Image (cartoon, rainbow, N blue to C red):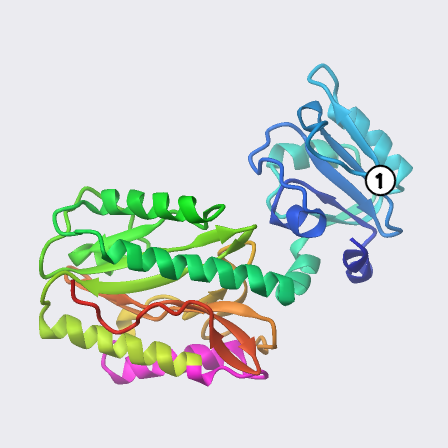
Amino acid sequence: MKRFLSYLGEYDGALITPSTNLYYLTGMKPQATEERLFLLVVNKEGESTLIAPKLYENEIKWEKAIFWSDNENPYEILDNVLSSLNLKTGKILIEDTMRASFLINIEHLLKDYELFPLSIVTKEMRIYKDNEETKLMKKAAQIADEVFYEVINIDLEGKTEKQVALEIEFLLREQSEDIAFDPIVAAGENAANPHHTPSERKIRRGDLVIFDFGAKYKGYCSDITRTVAIGEVNEKLKELHEIVKEAQERAVQSIYKGIMAKEVDSAARDYITKGGYGEYFIHRTGHGLGLEVHEEPYINATNETVLEDGMVFTIEPGIYLPGIGGVRIEDDVIVKKKGKRLTKAERDLIIL
């Protein structure tokens, strides 16, 4: 929390509900979907009070905490806490993902105030990963690599996308804390949809299949995508894979401390455009990675963020041909003077 206070600057305090920000700042990890008011109130002097449901009394420890029961009104408690911490006025940071019902009730307690998203401060803190965070992300990446190899050793032909996605989820949960996001398995023509939801479509010979998944290890996410062939595929699909693989390699090789995010995007996008498929590369080249699977910095065509040591993000160009299929290859990369891959599974086209 001391580091957080040093970032507060002009802001008078913060109201933080269950979120990755709460975990990052305090290590507390209540249910993110908690319907009862769970709120950490912090002022710029470093004084704080936790207001939480009594359900958490034996689980969560905080120097000053008030645990409320279901027959109490938590907003009456909050009103007193805001007064004691001198936070009923001023510039107040609010957790970005706070429930609207919480926010509406909180606003009734404030006077002469301005609200700002907490991410104004936390994105600047979280964009750089320290050595301990890097170790956790390397482990999450290693788990993703291992699960990929386990998946391609399954007899995939004849299984549905949904069946394989469930198998991936099982393997990830078995080896890590949780899945980073719902796995994507997209076969044949479905691979033309970047965020395809696994369906009852069976995997067949001649398909290219996109696998996109990640592990969560001690809160930190990995995110890997590979595209494999089920038996021999036509030359057109092989060409797509080679173009995407080279585009990804060029983007990774372009990374160095001091380059702008948009320049890395261009390294991949320009190569795909030169190959004749620019209009079929329909998303950004990458996104930041950490406690969330999508965070700063975003590797897109307009982002002028200068990449620095300790930043972690994905590089994931793709080509998607409607009615035919698609290819995406994704790795997690950390800046250490240059770009260094954290995920290391085979990128050449694997024919199963």
Residue underneath mark 1: 88
41 lies above or below 293: above
- Residue type marked 1: Lys
Depth check: 247 or 275 in front?
247
Q: Residue at x 67, y 40 (%)?
A: 17
Please state the horizontal and vertical placement of residue 72, each as a whole percent of the image: 75, 18
Examine the rendered structure and indicate whether residue 347 appears above or below residue 166. Answer: below
Observer able to see residue 289: no
Instruction: Check disc 1: other Cα within 10 Å, few if <14, some if 14-19, many if 20+.
Output: many
Q: Residue furthest top?
A: 71
- Residue 215 on image: x %, y %: 44, 53
Residue 17 left/right relative to 51: left
85 and 312: which one is in front?
312
Residues in magenta, as a range: 253-277
Q: Is residue 68 left or right of residue 220?
A: right
Q: Is residue 259 magenta?
A: yes
